[in-house]
Image: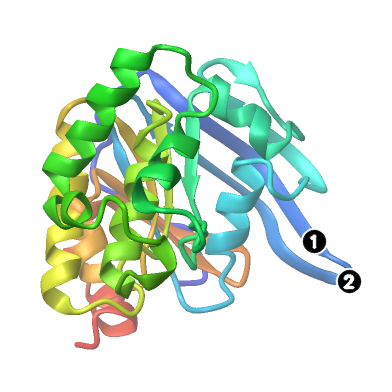
Amino acid sequence: MSEPVTLGERVAREPMLVVKDLEVSYGAIKALRGISLTVGQGEVVALIGANGAGKTSTLRAVSGMVTPAKGTVTLRGENVTGVKAHQMVPRGMAHAPEGRGIFPNLTVQENLDLGAYLRRDTQGIADDAKRCFSLFPRLQERREQLAGTLSGGEQQMLAISRSLMSRPKLLLLDEPSLGLAPQVTQTIFRILREVNAEGMSILLVEQNAHLALELANWAYVLETGDIVMQGTGKALLASEEIRKAYLGE
């Protein structure tokens, strides 16, 4: 996979996110080497690749957690390159990072409230919390429980729910299935499919390449900071190279 390969035809969509020639470096280490990608309105886009390929660095640069060395990030038509992470939220972006990043000493409800910290529509916030509890009934049962006492799967449900509380147009997810039981993983991907069907765009980094490609409208394959292949999720699932490299076949 030394040369980029485009598989399938991409449906024309209004761009939600456009990343162009993005470079990210950590000291002398170049994590991203000028990648370009697009997420269309209402689209699920997956990034797959081995550990160290640059997937998390891509999300961190897009969401403002790190400043790119070069390149541009455009969100809903606005150049947001170098904009800080907390300033991305009012622009319509939410990022559920690897490791979940919940507040362990706060309750489930308090974590959700913090997800809506920029909002002032009290009834809307209450309605969205109710919606999160309907998506993840286990969180309803543990509403007043400290988040740090939840199981790994419940913490991931909370991390996603907290992101949804800001009513994002674009949701960034980093390894949502990491360390979770298969049944919990299936639940989370079912919910992602549901929120996407309601119009939310999703940029997904996921170790389970099969699940990611099943969900994705479009996917990019990263290798050591470069995009080496892209195509529809369905086309990449059918690719012999992808099946051997990432699906264990």
Classify 68 as above or below 90. Answer: below
The amino acid at mark 1 is: Ser
The x and y percentages for residue 156 are 34, 61
Mark 2 residue crowding within 10 angstroms, few (<14) / some (14–19) / many (20+): few
> Which quarter of the picture shows residue 36?
top right
Measuring 34% from the left and 23% from the top, which residue is drawn there?
125
**Tag shown at residue 25:** 1
Classify 199 as above or below 20. Answer: above
Judging depth in this view, the residue of 180 and 235 nearest the camera is 180
Judging depth in this view, the residue of 64 and 132 nearest the camera is 132
Classify 114 as above or below 199. Answer: below
What secondary structure is marked by label 1?
Answer: strand
Residue position for label 2 = 28
Callout 2 touching callout 1 (CB < 8 Å): yes
Measuring 18% from the left and 43% from the top, which residue is drawn there?
133
Q: In this image, 87 relative to 193: left or right?
A: right
What secondary structure is marked by label 2?
Answer: loop
Mark 2 → mark 1, Cα distance in angstroms: 7 Å
